[in-house]
Image (cartoon, rainbow, N blue to C red):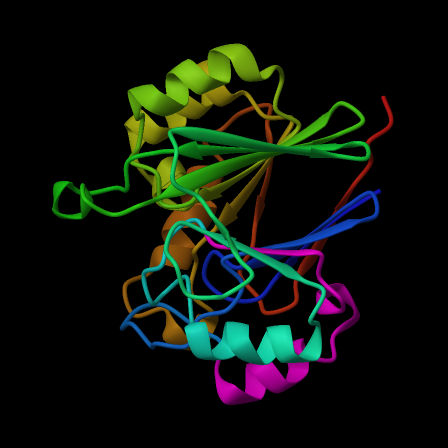
Amino acid sequence: MIQVTCSANAGIALQLGSLRLWADALHRRKVPGFSTVTPALWESLAVHPAFTSPDIIFYTHCHPDHFSRTLTCLALERWPDAKPILPETFFQEQLLLSGRRERLRFSEYTLDFLRLPHEGPQYAHVAHYGLLAEHQGFRVLIPGDCALCAPELTAFLVESGPIDLALLDFPWITLKRGREFIQKHIRPKTLLVCHLPFADDDLYGYRKAAVRSAAQLDGMDVRLLMEPFQQELFSNTP
């Protein structure tokens, strides 16, 4: 069984077999129109079963709406066996992502980290990595804040094999070219849409736009991550 649990924004805890991996789960800077891991949410997260004893704490990039050094230090104090993986140097025992593509293989798992361009030309310099996690043939794609329709992602998908579960920021479905790319190139069995604000933070109507746009992806299992600790379950059996 595969389980995804939301923290805030694009943050999730992924249970993939016995592997417990966090992606962009801890951040604390409040950006208007979005949500973050508040002190109260952190207290709940630190004792929530889905966020207990992570094996890997991964960050696609280190923008403050995806990464907090302070909260990550607190998590590493609580779970010292967790391995931080990120593209900038912050921790003594971390794995630094620096190449175009890096692969970790252990036990029954493969983690492929691919350098991808961040959305927006102003962020062209940002070190940013997507992840394809695989366990017993079940593939989970987490491209982070990857630029919509990036050719680097297209090329990677050609060789990756079928995608069972993709986690994409909401502009991928609210913009027509993003929906077309999903249907032509990603073709996931299930699409989880993230980086959506909680209801009290939704200043610009992103939640309503995402609900409306999801209905345009005919024949696809689309689910929206919109609440803290929302959980979605998937089976890795045919």
How many numbered discs?
Answer: 0
66, 191: nearer the viewer: 66
The image shows residue 52, relative to residue 172, as above or below, that is below
Is residue 160 toward the left or the right of residue 1 in the image?
A: left
Residue 15: percent from left, percent from top: 75, 50
Residue 220: percent from left, percent from top: 59, 27
Residue 198: percent from left, percent from top: 47, 69
Task: Name which quarter of the figure residue 42 lies in.
Answer: bottom right
Is residue 54 toward the left or the right of residue 49 in the image?
A: left
Image quarter where the N terminus lies is: top right
Identify the residue at the far front of this view: 92
32, 134: nearer the viewer: 134
Is residue 210 toward the left or the right of residue 121 in the image?
A: right
For the point 28% across and 42% down, the residue is 118
Specify the segment rendered in magenta: 38-59
The image shows residue 137, relative to residue 119, as above or below, that is above
Task: Name which quarter of the figure residue 185 lies in.
Answer: top left
Residue 142 can be seen in this image: no
Q: Is residue 49 magenta?
A: yes
The image shows residue 113, relative to residue 136, as above or below, that is below
For the point 52% across and 59% down, the residue is 11
For the point 45% across and 19% down, the residue is 156
Q: Is residue 62 magenta?
A: no
